[in-house]
Amino acid sequence: LTIQGTEIPIGGTVVTAGTYRCLWNETRVQCFASVVDSALAAVTTDDDDVAQYADDGMETWFDTAHDGGAVQDTDDYHFLLNLQNAAALYVNDDTPFTHAGFTSAVGLGGTLNSPDTDSGYVLEWAQTWAGMGVTPHSGLVLGFNVSLNQRNDGAAHVQTSWTGAFNTPSLWGTLTLGDLPVPDPCSTTQKLATSKLAAPKLTGTSRACLMP
C-alpha cells in the first residue's frame, strides 16, 4: 500500500509545503515526508522529549483498534521525529514507548539552525507491527493522522495536520492496508539455471522462472 499525501502547506514566517507517503509489509509500517523549507530548524536533540513538536519534523498517530475516542488509550500510538533525528514515541497519550522496533533517518537540503537559505528535507521512519501488537493483513483498517511541523523565529512554531486534529482519535482519518505484491516464486538461482534452457522443453514452474 502506498498512501500518497496531498501537499500540506505549513505556513508561518517561513513558507513551506510537504507531502508524505506510507508503505507496509508483513513486518513493519514505514512513513516518509518530503518538505520544501528555506530555513531548517530543530533544537531538541534527546529522544523522548515531547518538545520536538515545536521543531521542523513530522508526527504520526495510529489507532490500531480503530475505536476512536476523545482521548488516546492503550491502542493509540504517537511518533514524533525531528530534523535532529531525535524520536519521541508514546502510547496511551503520554506513556513512553520502546524504541526497539523503531528506526529512522533524516536527510537535509541545507544547514540546520543556520541563517543560510535551505531547500528542504526528507525524513523517514519505520515501526514493526509486532511492537504495536498488530497482525497486518490486506483490508485492515486503522485510525491514522499525520502532522508536518515547522519551527519559525526561535520558539515560534506551526503544526499542520492532515485532518486538522491532533490528539483526539475520533477526529483522525483512516488507513486501509491494500494488497501486498504477489511474491516471486522463483529464486535468482532458479532463474539463472533455467534461463539457459530451451523454452519448449519447460513446463509449469520451470517455464515461469525463465529470465526474459
Image (cartoon, helix red, strand yellow):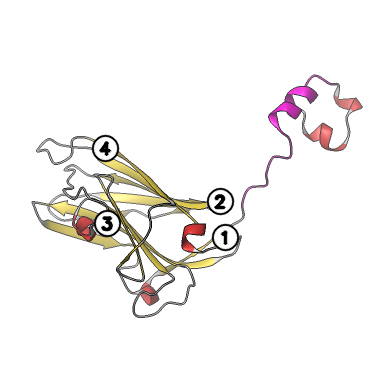
Q: What's the distance in space between the residues labelled 4 and 2, CA to CA? A: 27 Å
- Could you tell whether 38 is left or right of 2 in the image? left
**Which of the two marks, 2 or 3, is nearer to us in this view?**
3
Q: What's the distance in space between the residues labelled 1 and 2, CA to CA? A: 8 Å
Q: Write down the residue under mark 2.
A: 25
Q: Which mark is residue 108?
A: 4
Q: Sequence-wise, which precedes: disc 1 or disc 3?
A: 3
Q: Secondary structure at mark 3?
A: loop
Q: Sequence-wise, which precedes: disc 2 or disc 3?
A: 2
Please rate how many residues cluster around mark 1, counting C-alpha atoms within 10 Å: few if below 14, some from 14 to 19, many from 20. Answer: some
Residue drawn at the location 91% of the way across and 26% of the way down = 201
Q: Write down the residue under mark 3.
A: 48
Q: Are marks 1 and 2 in contact (CB under 8 Å)?
A: yes
Check disc 3 and give the amino acid type: Asp
Q: Write down the residue under mark 1.
A: 136
Q: Which residues are magenta?
A: 180-197
Q: Position of residue 80 (x, y in %)?
A: 30, 56
Visible residue check, residue 137: yes
Q: What's the distance in space between the residues labelled 1 and 3, CA to CA? A: 26 Å
- Could you tell whether 61 is left or right of 37 in the image? right
